[in-house]
Image (cartoon, rainbow, N blue to C red):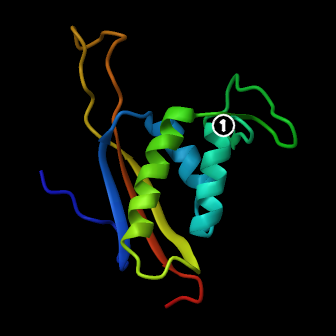
Amino acid sequence: MKLGYSAQGKYRSMGRELSISPKVSREIAAAIRGMKAEDAKAFLEKVIAKEKAVPYRRFNKKVAHKKGMMSGRYPVNASKHFLKVLENAVSNAEGTENLVITHISANRARVQYGRYKGSPSNTQRTHLQIILGAANGN
């Protein structure tokens, strides 16, 4: 199956069938959307070190409150995948200053089934797209 980008942009990167939850991916994408690339990298590194939590706005039932914010968690595995895709998009750019995340999307991919279709060992997969643009709109 051919998978294209959902938006236009010069500096872009895609991760396909990443082994992370689509719900967690949505929350991380909402947290870093519109950030500068360097700020998003720093944020993801703090999440990996469990210094800063990702705010959960939509999928927040039975999620504990964190210091200085409402509900949130530390999705370390998903943040590592996001950081890899973001660093790949930044490496595609010539000048790394003034880059902003203009588009980010996390979509459901196919499910990797375990032994049985209804097995709890089924693994959710996610497609991830990050597109960077200049901060001044060019």
Dot 1, how many residues are within 10 Å of its Cα: few (below 14), some (14-19), or many (20+)?
few
Q: Position of residue 37 (x, y in %)?
A: 57, 67
79 shown above or below 116:
below
Give the residue number, with chain letter if any, for mark 1. Answer: 49
Q: Position of residue 15 (x, y in %)?
A: 33, 51
Please tell me which residue is depicted at 71% across the width and 26% down the height of the picture: 63
Q: In this image, 81 relative to 4: left or right?
A: right
Q: Residue at x 44, y 38 (%)?
A: 22
Outermost residue, left side = 1
Please indicate whether residue 86 sits to the left or right of residue 35 in the image.
Answer: left
x, y percentage for residue 119?
Answer: 31, 9
Is any part of residue 5 visible from this angle?
yes
**In terms of secondary structure, where does tag 1 sit?**
loop
Query: Which image quadrant for residue 114?
Result: top left
Left or right position of 136 against 17: right
In the figure, 111 relative to 68: above or below?
A: above
Q: Is residue 7 visible?
A: no
Compared with 129, 138 (above or below) is below
Residue 4 rendering spot, x and y as whole percentages: 23, 63
Foreground pick, 77 / 54 = 77
Residue in view at x 59 percent, y 54 percent: 30
Residue type highlighted by circle 1 = Ala
Q: Nearer the viewer, residue 81 or 102?
A: 81
